[in-house]
Structure formats: structure tokens, C-alpha cells
Image (spheres, helix red, strand yellow):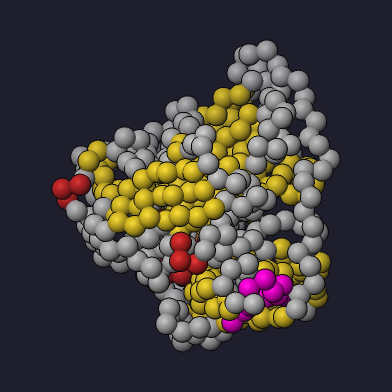
Amino acid sequence: MPGPARTPGDPTARAALSSPPTLAPGLPLRRLARLSTQGPELRATVVAAPHLASLVPGAQTELWCFNGEYPGPIIEIEEGQRAVLTFQNGLGIDSTVHWHGLPVPPDQDGSPMDPVPAQGERVYAFDIPVGTAGTYWYHPHAHRTTTLQVGHGLAAPLIVVDPADPLLALPIHERVLMVTALGLDASGRVAVPSASMGMPSTALASIELLVNGQKMPVLTAAPGATERWRILNATADRFLRLSLDGRAFAVVGTDGGLLGESLAGVTEWLLTPGQRVELVVTIDRRPSSQFTLRDLGYGGGMMNGMGRPLMTVRTSTDAPMDHVLLPARLRELPDIGAPAAEQNVLLSPAGMGMMSGTFLINGRTFDMNRVDLASVAGRIERWNFTNATPMDHPMHIHGTQFQVVSRTIRGVEFAEGYRAWLDTVNVPAGQSVSIKVRQAMPGKRMFHCHILPHEDAGMMAVLDVRPA
Ligand code: C2O
Ligand code: CU
Ligand code: CU
């Protein structure tokens, strides 16, 4: 079903895109534009505006894009630098920019409490602390229209670089792979998923899964090459069960950057909406061979079960590269510490049950004027998410990174097998997930399901972090 009524942007601003998406498969994978600086401060302007693209014969599609790019430009920033980003809202509705996963002050977080009005402007400024190197992203977070805005194309990567990253010293080729979903109806208009029926996506529209704005692009690499892929799931509602046609790869990083030790021999990885993963992939040594980066499809209660290919990886006829041995330890990743408080977060279906597509957090639907949980800056807490609905929900907390402690399945608690920094964790249908989390700064923070139609329908709550 098509989503809420589309709100057209300012028609005077509808310039053609400088980097439009393409639905023609088989083109060389493109590199996204980058905003970066050598100096201590990254100053840039990020403009959200409507643009027209020719995607289906005989029709023009209106997309909403950052700086005329689909997806938007990568903001690349080093630990210790400061970001000063002017946001111009060229849309016809309120918007914001949310810096997903970064520990920015609450008043710089682009939450729905801080809308930037249509045609308005504001500056977001924040420091990038040491230790935050990782793969993040930025997207609008306006009240009830996040699905609409992200679904029209407003999403982009934000990479925090640690110059001492141990993998940077090795002959490893790095790529950013931004996965987005583009739904188009029969007349070429963008159709975004709605929460009704609890179904993830428009039944009437075709949904394309794009990598860097391209359908089934081709990544070409030298035989035997070692590659580091930063993969972002910026779709509104699609769980990606990533595989490389059965080839083993190493997982070296998650939402909040590198793991302590890489996970070798992985053949499948579930990447929920909102999450990121860093893989190290060794390309086949045989020249002129190929394999596919694929979403195998994921049941997850009611979620989209059908898989589909995302990208072709082709081996060139260049001279083969030498094998690269990954360091055993990637970085220190200490346990977050012993919790001093506990919070329980119950996810449940609303009213008429699961078919309404509306889900509650601790029995309530989102109200930005209410505080749902209270915390204290600097306090380590254990949060227990319990999912009493028939579908999975990827739960996201703003302003920090957390560690998963355990998962409880049919009453049996299993300790998490590895330590990682996450800002979004899948809470499978009928299960519980316990995390340890600490908010450094006082202020109000959102936490919500990152299936965007769920968030827009009210599966979001307010955490009030009080000064210590
Ligand atoms: Cu990407 Cu409130 O999230
Ligand atoms: Cu966020
Ligand atoms: Cu959800």
C-alpha cells in the first residue's frame, strides 16, 4: 500500500540530480561523493531538496536528496575533528538531520523535537570524540515523516576515521556500500512503505534494492585482493541477510566501529534496517570469475521473506594480489562495566493486534512531550528489551553505542558470543535481548524501532538523561 500522501517539495527547486539513481543493472559500482577536510573543523552545507530523475519510461520521478546526490555524499571525518554543518531544508515540510549512532549533544541530534521548518536553515555542530571511528549515517528524523523522507532518498553515510586504524596500514581496498530501497508505483512516483497491515512494503509498487544508488552494480577487483566493505542498511524496513554465494568472509566491525577481534569464517550476516557492518572479503584468485553479494531473505515474523541479489563481484585479469593476514586484535574493546540500574522495555502490539501495524513501547505510543524512561548521565544500565509481538523489531537508542549481554529464547538466557558496539539491535519476535548502555550527556534522547513505518506510527519513546 502506498504510504501517507506525498507532500511535494518546492517546485522551483526541482533541479535535475547531479548523481541520480540508476535502475539499469550491470554498471560499474560508483564511489559516492565525499565531504571532508584536512583542517580541525569540517565545515559543509547539506541541502535537502526535491529533484527530478528519469527512472521509468515516460515519467519523471521526484526524489528528495542531499546535495543533489542519491544517496547523499559521504561525510568523512577524523576522530578529534569538529563538524559544523549547515542544513538547508529545501523541502515543503519540516525536516531535521539526525547523525545516527554518533554521541552528539541532544540539541544537535536532529530529533523530532527540533524540527527545521520548510525552507528553513540551521547549523549542527559537534565534536567527534576519540574512539568513535566507525560507519554511521545521517538522515531526516522529522515527526511522523521519517519514512517519507528517507524513502524519497534522504540518507547518506558518515564515516569516522581513526588515522591509527590497524587495517589502514594494510593493502586493503576500502569501499562504502550504501543499501537503499526505492519503491516506485506504476506511474513512476516514489511509494514508501506504510505501517498498515504490519507488512513491510507497498504491494502495488515495485521495490528496488540499490547499492550506492545502483541496481546490481558490478564491483571489479584484482584476483586475490583483500577488500574492506562498509555496508549500511538505509532501507526503511528490509532486513538484509547478507551472503557471498556461500564464501566465507570476516566481520571486523559493527555500528560503532571495529570489533576487538575479527570474526572469521562467517557466511551470513543479518543487517537490520539502520545497522552497519564492516566485512573483510578476499576476492577469488581465479581471473574472470564472479560471485554475488546477496540478500538471502529473512522471515523475522512477518518481514519480507524473499531474497534478492545486490551486487556482482567480478575478478579482473590483473596480476593476483598477495594474501593479507588480518591482525589478531583489531583494538581494545573493553566490557562497558557493571550496571548500576536496570530498565525494562516491552514491545507489544497495539489495540487490534498485529495487523494494525502499530506497536507499543511499555504500553504506550510516542508522545514527545512525555518522558518514558529516566536515566542519569554516566550511569551504566542494563536494558532488557522483550518482544511480545509476532515480528522482529530492530531497536535503536540515540546518542550512544551499547553492548549486547545476552539473548533469552523460550526462557533460556544465552550469553552473547562476542563483544561489539551497536546502536541498533534486532529483538526477534518472542525473544528478549539484554544490553549494557551508558549515556554520557544529559538531555532527552529518542529510542525506537528502526523499521521506519513503525517509528512513524509511534513505536518510539523518550529517555530523559538527567545530570549526574
Ligand atoms: Cu537512524 Cu532515530 O534513527
Ligand atoms: Cu539514531
Ligand atoms: Cu518495529
**Residue 294 seen in this snapshot:** no
Quarter in which the N terminus is drawn? bottom left
Residue 343 location (% of width, % of height): 66, 81
The reply, left or right, for residue 464 in relation to residue 140 is: right
Q: Is residue 466 above or below residue 23?
A: below
The reply, left or right, for residue 269 in relation to residue 158 is: right
Q: Which of these two is toward me, 166 or 261?
A: 166
**Residue 258 seen in this snapshot:** yes
Q: Which residues are magenta?
A: 374-383
Q: Which of these two is toward me, 258 or 122?
A: 122
Q: Residue furthest front?
A: 40
Q: Is residue 369 above or below residue 174?
A: below
Quarter in which the C terminus is drawn? bottom right
Q: Quadrant of residue 315?
A: top right
In this rendering, the count of numbered labels is 0
Residue found at x 20% / y 47%: 13
Residue 205 location (% of width, % of height): 35, 54
**Which SS does the magenta portion mostly show?**
strand
Residue found at x 38% / y 55%: 123
